[in-house]
Amino acid sequence: MLGAEQGDALALDVDDKDAAESTDIRARALLAKAVSAMWDSESELSVIHPELSLAPQRIAVRALDEALQLVRVSLRPSRRPTNP
């Protein structure tokens, strides 16, 4: 995402229905949405409108929460530990 300023960031195709069904692609699209919302929030903060920056911040938090729920991994030991 940080590479977007230099033009070498990856483009996310969020309109492709087949790709959107993939958890990884969907999570990346949500992360892109969160970054976009935070840029909107930063724009409002830079012109000293903190109250207007709250809505984009909330959008970003919801997108991040949803993306993190998609990629949660639960680790289970494959065998019992030898040393307790």
Image (cartoon, rainbow, N blue to C red):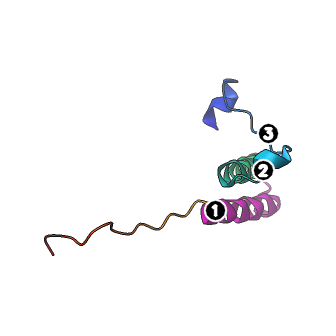
Contact flag, marks 3 and 1 (Cβ < 8 Å): no
Tell me if 81 is positioned left or right of 1 in this view.
Answer: left
Which label belongs to residue 20? 2
Q: Amino acid at mark 1?
A: Leu
| Residue 71 x/y as whole percent | 58, 59
Q: Give the Cα distance between marks 3 and 1.
A: 18 Å
SS class of the residue under badge 1? helix
x 68%, y 29%: residue? 5
Q: Earlier in the sequence, mark 1 or mark 2?
A: 2
Q: Earlier in the sequence, mark 2 or mark 3?
A: 3
Q: Give yes or no for residue 20 being in the magenta stretch.
A: no
SS class of the residue under badge 2? helix
In this orientation, which residue lies closer to the viewer: 74 or 57?
74
Which label belongs to residue 46? none
Residue pointed to by mark 1: 70
- Against 9, residue 26 (above or below) is below
Residue 67 is drawn in which quadrant? Answer: bottom right
Q: Amino acid at mark 2?
A: Ala
Task: Give the magenta range.
Answer: 43-69
Label 3 environment density (alpha carbons within 10 Å; few <14, some 14–19, many ≥20): few
Q: Amino acid at mark 3?
A: Asp
Q: Is residue 47 visible?
A: no
| Residue 64 x/y as whole percent | 66, 60
Q: Give the Cα distance between marks 2 and 3.
A: 8 Å
Q: Give yes or no for residue 63 being in the magenta stretch.
A: yes
The chief SS type of the magenta part is helix
- Against 82, residue 53 (above or below) is above
